[in-house]
Image (cartoon, grey):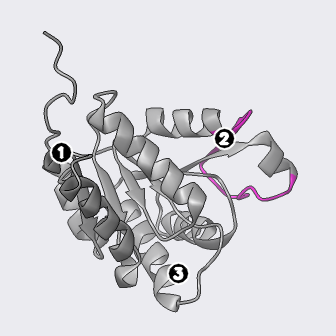
Amino acid sequence: MRSIAVYCGSKFGNHPVYEQGARQLGRCLAEQGIRLVYGGGNVGLMGVVASQALACGGEVVGVIPQSLKNRELAHGGLSELLVVQDMHERKQTMAGLADGFIAMPGAAGTLEEIFEAWTWAQLGYHAKPCAFFNLDGYFDTLLSFVDQMVSSGFMAEEYRDMLIVSDDPEAILAAFRTYTPPGEKWHLS
């Protein structure tokens, strides 16, 4: 595992556990020699995870659209900052650089990013693991809805089982190292 993309909030959230988790994840990635790929911002949990990885000697690559960089939201001390045209290019660039994907607490953008990576994995566009860093049960309700997708017949259980869920970044990275993707979703005859 060379690089991990982390999707997370541009805000801190209402509980200190989220910021503590971002620090823990940044430190863990740096200590294991895993490059952090993230949205390039210096705000909220995004800024915290990047700053902590850098403080621990890690490599951090930010990918930010020009419009957000123009608003002075870019982190100034990254190993590398890639400036792209728009959010679509940002996601594609991050996906190309990453060997796996972790979602931390965040809002609609965070969910959109991890769901796209997970969807691409289901469709066989990549064989990279996807995880939810489930701090303080943040994703519990969402994961219950994913279980409802399975019980309602809209998703095979093997695709639900693709998701790695933990409140421990060490456990997530250990699961990434042994991850085996399911078979192809669409079997053509």
**Where does the magenta region start and end?**
71-87
In this figure, which residue is indicated by the disc labeled 3?
Answer: 19
Q: Is residue 44 above or below residue 83?
A: below
Q: Earlier along the polypeptide chain: callout 2 or callout 1? A: 2
Residue at numbered disc 2: 87
Q: Residue at x 35, y 45 (%)?
A: 118
Horizontal arrangement in the rendering, residue 85 relative to residue 60 (left or right): right
First of labels 3, 1 by sequence position: 3
Residue lying at 52% horizontally and 71% vertically, measured from the top left: 52
Q: Earlier in the sequence, mark 2 or mark 3?
A: 3
> Residue 134 lies in what quarter of the image?
bottom left
- Relative placement, left or right, of 35 versus 39 is left
Q: Residue at x 40, y 61 (%)?
A: 30
Which dot marks residue 24? none
Label 1, secondary structure: give it: loop
Number of the front mark, 2 or 3: 2
Q: Quadrant of the N terminus?
A: top left
Give the residue at mark 1.
156
Question: Could you classify mark 2 by the number of other residues whose Cα lies within 10 Å: few (under 14), some (14-19), or many (20 or more)?
Answer: some
Residue 74: x and y in percent read: 74, 55
Residue at left 48%, top 73%? 22
48 relative to 60, above or below: below
Q: CA distance from mark 3 to mark 1?
A: 34 Å
Q: CA distance from mark 2 to mark 1?
A: 29 Å
